Image: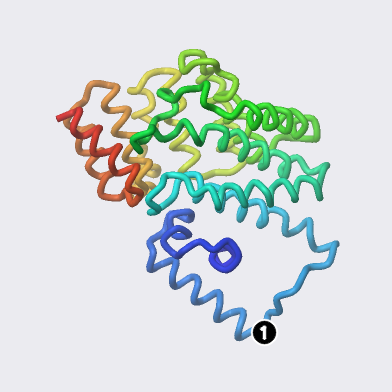
């Protein structure tokens, strides 16, 4: 998968490392080992036969998902969004959905991408500042992409049991349907994250579930979930863990711990837009 992202997706080693929550040297070693294995075993590059395609679907979906994610929140580019990556991921996901019209996860992934991409113009202010979801101008969201995404989500849900991408699209759909931040059904979103965690266990999913629970039940409850040793240990080097923890501490009125968490997030942040946002939060708390 890492080699696919490097050679076909065009992602740099630091970007792939962030996608897999590992250090850059660790990912560099993985890439070297993968290339060596291909060379030593004389593994050919070839188009697989039709009967091999279903077994490769999950890998293809994951590759497109990670390419989109890097485009949606760039590791170190000057801009927050790399539209050449998000646009290409959406194009390829659309092709895949047309080739596999009865595969709910392929359709769910396309729905997820469109629903997320619909917010791209509202995520950064004219001056270049990051705008959080709850503060975005929802009139600036792309209604065409939202309507298409919601239609695809309904179609995917009718095709069979909801897999990870359909569940993520359902979460994005809850945000898209809410006319205002106050109208967001956070209890429903927390419930969907619970289903997602059972379908695809991941510390990042648990992080997102904790934030949703905090929005539904209060920051203290979210902090209880974030402070579980196994979660905080797994995500210690993950910028979004620390920025989420800082925000919940800020909402709970714990200023000094919030500042320490923002400082840790700032140490880990590499995108200039995200760094400016974290610096502004620190200045406000100071």
Q: Quarter of the image for the C terminus: give it.
A: top left
Picture residue at 64% right of the left edge, 32% below the top: 145
Q: Secondary structure at mark 1?
A: loop
Q: Nearer the viewer, residue 88 or 243?
A: 88
In the rendered image, residue 149, in percent from the top left (x then y), is placed at 67, 32
Whether residue 83 sits left or right of residue 41 in the image: it is: left
Q: Quadrant of residue 22?
A: bottom left
Q: Quadrant of residue 260?
A: top left
Whether residue 116 sits left or right of residue 102 in the image: it is: left
Q: Is residue 130 above or below residue 136?
A: below
Q: Quadrant of residue 229?
A: top left
Q: Is residue 108 above or below residue 32?
A: above
Picture residue at 41% right of the left edge, 67% below the top: 26
Picture residue at 58% right of the left edge, 79% below the top: 37
Q: Is residue 253 above or below residue 19?
A: above
Q: Quarter of the image for the N terminus: give it.
A: bottom right
Residue reaching furthest to the left: 286
What color scheme is it? rainbow
Q: Nearer the viewer, residue 219 or 89?
A: 89
Picture residue at 33% right of the left edge, 23% below the top: 220
Whether residue 21 sits left or right of residue 129 in the image: it is: right
In the rendered image, residue 66, in percent from the top left (x then y), is placed at 55, 52
Report the number of discs: 1
Question: Which residue is denoted by mark 1 in the rendering?
Answer: 42
In the rendered image, residue 281, in percent from the top left (x then y), is placed at 25, 32
- Callout 1 crowding tier (Cα within 10 Å): few <14, some 14–19, many ≥20: few
Whether residue 159 sits left or right of residue 88 in the image: it is: right
Residue reaching furthest to the front: 126
In the rendered image, residue 91, in percent from the top left (x then y), is placed at 68, 49
């Amino acid at each position: 998968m890492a080699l696919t992202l490097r050679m076909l997706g065009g992602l740099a080693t630091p970007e792939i490392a962030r996608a897999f929550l590992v250090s850059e040297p660790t990912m560099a070693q993985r890439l070297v080992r993968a290339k060596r294995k291909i060379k030593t075993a004389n593994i050919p590059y070839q188009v697989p036969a039709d009967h091999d395609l279903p077994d490769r679907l999950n890998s293809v979906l994951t590759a497109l998902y990670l390419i989109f994610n890097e485009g949606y929140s760039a590791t170190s580019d000057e801009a927050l969004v790399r539209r050449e990556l998000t646009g290409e991921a959406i194009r390829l996901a659309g092709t895949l959905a047309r080739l596999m019209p009865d595969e709910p996860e392929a359709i769910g992934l396309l729905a997820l991408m469109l629903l997320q991409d619909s917010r791209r113009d509202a995520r950064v202010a004219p001056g270049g500042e990051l705008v959080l979801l709850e503060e975005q101008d929802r009139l600036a969201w792309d209604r065409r992409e939202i309507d298409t995404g919601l239609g695809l989500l309904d179609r995917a849900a009718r095709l069979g049991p909801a897999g990870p991408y359909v569940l993520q699209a359902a979460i994005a759909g809850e945000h898209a349907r809410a006319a205002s931040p106050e109208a967001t059904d956070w209890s429903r979103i927390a419930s969907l994250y619970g289903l997602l965690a059972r379908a695809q266990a991941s510390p990042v999913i648990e992080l997102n579930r904790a934030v949703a629970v905090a929005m539904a039940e209060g920051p203290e409850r979210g902090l209880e979930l974030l402070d579980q040793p196994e979660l905080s240990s797994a995500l210690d080097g993950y910028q979004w863990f620390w920025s989420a923890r800082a925000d919940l501490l800020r909402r709970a009125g714990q200023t000094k711990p919030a500042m320490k968490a923002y400082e840790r997030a700032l140490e880990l942040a590499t995108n200039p837009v995200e760094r400016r946002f974290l610096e502004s939060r620190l200045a406000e708390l100071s």
